[in-house]
């Protein structure tokens, strides 16, 4: 777990990494956000949170290979 949060100790590196992940996985991230908004608007808050969390995770840590 501590390895996951180590990325926040180097904010400039994190910004560059996040930009890379958004460029590489942008379509998937956008779909998760759009689906999350639809779920949220339909009152399905848990599902929306899962989709928003997945999108944020991809932006910060990428997709495990």
Image: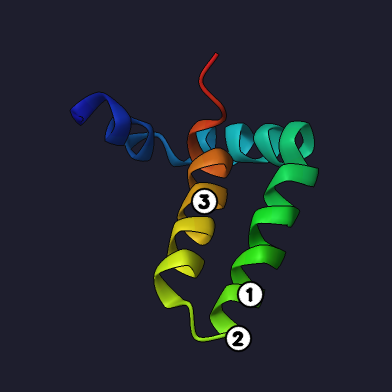
**5 or 45, which is in the foreground?**
45
| Left or right of residue 3, residue 22 in this image | right
Q: Residue 45, image x and y in percent?
A: 43, 76
Q: Earlier in the sequence, mark 1 or mark 3?
A: 1
Kindly indicate whether the residue at mark 1 contacts the one at mark 2 (C-beta within 8 angstroms): yes
Q: Earlier in the sequence, mark 3 or mark 2?
A: 2
Give the alpha-carbon distance from disc 1 to disc 3, as whole Å: 14 Å
Give the alpha-carbon distance from disc 3 to disc 2, as whole Å: 19 Å
Crowd rating for badge 3 (residues with CA inside 10 Å; few <14, some 14–19, many 20+): some
**Quadrant holding the C terminus:** top right
- Please give the residue where the numbered disc 2 appears in the rendered image: 41
Crowd rating for badge 2 (residues with CA inside 10 Å; few <14, some 14–19, many 20+): few
Looking at the rendered structure, which numbered label has been put on residue 56? 3
In the rendered image, the residue lying farthest to the left is: 2
- Helix, strand or loop under label 1: helix
Residue appearing at x 68%, y 49% in the figure? 29
The image shows residue 26, relative to residue 7, as above or below, that is below
């Amino acid at each position: 777990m501590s390895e996951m949060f180590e990325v926040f100790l180097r904010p400039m590196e994190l910004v560059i990494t996040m930009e890379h992940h958004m460029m590489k996985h942008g379509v998937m991230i956008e779909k998760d956000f759009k689906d999350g908004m639809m779920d949220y608007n339909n009152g399905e808050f848990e599902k929306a949170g899962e989709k928003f969390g997945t999108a944020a995770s991809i932006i910060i840590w990428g997709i495990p290979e």
